[in-house]
Image (spheres, grey):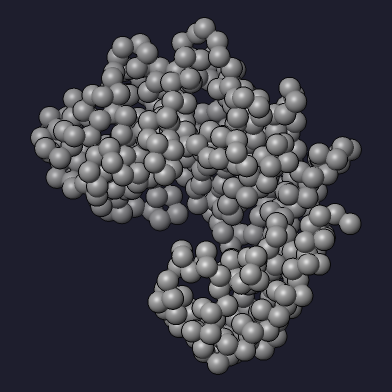
Amino acid sequence: MSSPSIAQNLQQPTSDSIVILLKKYINAKDADAIYDLTGKDYQKDLSKAFLVDFLTKQIFPLGEIKETSFISFKNKISNYKLQFDKATIQLSLNLDQDDKLGLFQFKPFRPEKAELVATSNPLQTAFEKEIDAVVRTYIQKPNTVGLSVGVFCAGKNSIYYYGETAKGNGKLPDANTIFEIGSITKTFTATLLAYFVDQGKIKLTDPITKYLPDFAAENVLLKEVSILMLSNHTSGLAPLPDNFETGNFNPINPYQNYTRNQLFAYLKTCKLISKPGEVYAYSNMAVGLLGIILERISGQTYEAMVKTIICKPLNLESTKEYLLSNQKEHFVKVYNTDGNETLTWDFDALQACGSLRSTANDLLKYANANMKVENNDLSKAFQLTHQITFNKNPKVGLGWHIMNINGDEYLWHNGGTGGSRSFLAFNSVKKTAIVILSNSAESVDPVGVGIIKLMQ
């Protein structure tokens, strides 16, 4: 028996007993009794008041649980289907060493696809079979469509394709299939910043007001915000400006019509949400503004900078914001969290935060270039982006975030649009990298982390 099967056999009888108790207490609307089923770590993270409020507002109104059934056991988590009077919910849980609830989550129930989704994975090696097992937990969901999985391990690239480029077309993604990469774009922006720092055209310590129009630079609060802080998300700027949803705002293509003039008008009178340099707060606006500043010091458009400084030297032919006519036929259709087709995103002022499109092949080249130390300007820029600039939680370099998986540190970033998700991580010491690109708005982070663990 495999170790997951052993773990399931050990945990499931106790988990089943817990589910029986949960059914009893939910039907009785006894939130206190449910909280008593949780373990010390759970209670340390979430207060009793929080759980009572959640159950009272979100779960008890669904009525009584009529039926419970076991679905699956994956990654030490037991999943159950709960049939309420008014909805069907999936319950995910695991148990701590005291057989108390360590994980306790509700989410909408979505049955997996009945047939196995097509793949190019030949399943010839144990590693390929393990990758397939991780990927199947994602691609068999009813709201996912297509996936490109790129792996660099043991000195070679391997790319596996799953699903379809558009729902129902029966066409697997391939080497030419282009996806939105969302916020992985921010690592390209950070590389441009590092490149211009090395060229002496800008300093990380420069206040951003040095590069803003005079009327926007008059905001005294911005004088404490440095260029560095735009890249490592410690600027104190909000995630998005408060005039973002004005004018010609389109909720399914939200960045398309937000202009530089709107951004500068906002900056003129904006308030900061935290003291610059002290608190990590992820900001699309900050990185978008950084891109504009780099345009102003270089005299080039954002896409032109990406092309000349990064893509051309690395031969990344499919990484760009605006696709050529012969590339558009290779661009996937994209699907929201419900699995319905939606729009790809277009950008104006904030393009540096998420506008690029790419392939798994290009991003593996990009990851490999990041892992090499060479005596050229681009390699030196990559190495600068890897230096930690914020050492609290999370740890951040320039653009890149640092995560620890089983004692090994990986530089990584993910991305998301209205209908796409992406994941890129690498470890320069182990010389391993993973790229996940999806044309669905279902997070691929668990797939990326799961495959990293297989390579350790």
On screen, residue 208 versus residue 323, left or right, reads left
Q: Residue at x 82, y 60 (%)?
A: 5
Of the 4 image quadrants, the one containing the C terminus is top right
| Quadrant of the rendered image containing residue 215 | top left
On screen, residue 273 versus residue 429, left or right, reads left
Q: Residue at x 21, y 46 (%)?
A: 272
162 or 375: nearer the viewer:
375
Query: In the image, is residue 57 above or below residue 363?
Result: below
Residue 217 in sight in this render: yes
Residue 132, position in %: x, y?
78, 46
Query: In the image, is residue 276 above or below residue 317?
Result: below
Query: In the image, is residue 65 above or below residue 330?
Result: below
Of the 4 image quadrants, the one containing the N terminus is bottom right
Residue 189 in sight in this render: no
Residue 31, position in %: x, y?
49, 84
| Quadrant of the rendered image containing residue 231 | top left
Residue at the limit of the structure toward the bottom, as seen here: 28
Q: Residue at x 18, y 25 (%)?
A: 210
